[in-house]
Image (spheres, helix red, strand yellow):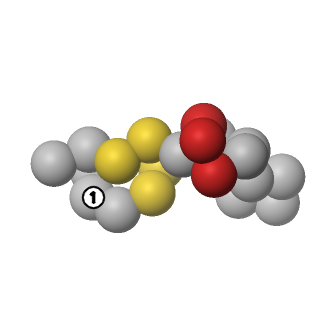
């Protein structure tokens, strides 16, 4: 996984909820 990961691409969470995986 890289960049921003979320389960609902149509309903992205708040920027604070964005998960960055390195």
Identify the residue shown where x is 54% and y is 45%. 18
**For residue 16, side relative to residue 5 (left or right):** right
Q: Nearer the viewer, residue 17 or 9?
A: 17
Identify the residue shown where x is 60% and y is 41%. 16
Task: Give the percent coordinates (x, y) of residue 12.
Answer: 74, 53
Say which residue label 1 marks. 2
Q: Secondary structure at mark 1?
A: loop
Specify the farthest residue to the front. 16
**For residue 10, side relative to residue 3 (left or right):** right
Whether residue 6 is visible to the viewer of this picture, yes or no, is no
**Count of labels shown?**
1
Identify the residue shown where x is 83% and y is 52%. 11
Whether residue 22 is visible to the viewer of this picture, yes or no, is yes
Where is residue 7, by image quadrant? top right
Task: Give the percent coordinates (x, y) of residue 17.
Answer: 60, 37
Task: Give the percent coordinates (x, y) of residue 13.
Answer: 73, 44
Specify the farthest residue to the right. 11
Does residue 12 lie above or below 17 as drawn? below
For label 1, count other residues whose C-alpha is less than 10 Å away and answer few (under 14), some (14-19) or many (20+).
Answer: few
């Amino acid at each position: 996984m890289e960049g921003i990961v979320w389960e609902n691409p149509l309903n992205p969470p708040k920027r604070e909820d964005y998960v960055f995986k390195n």
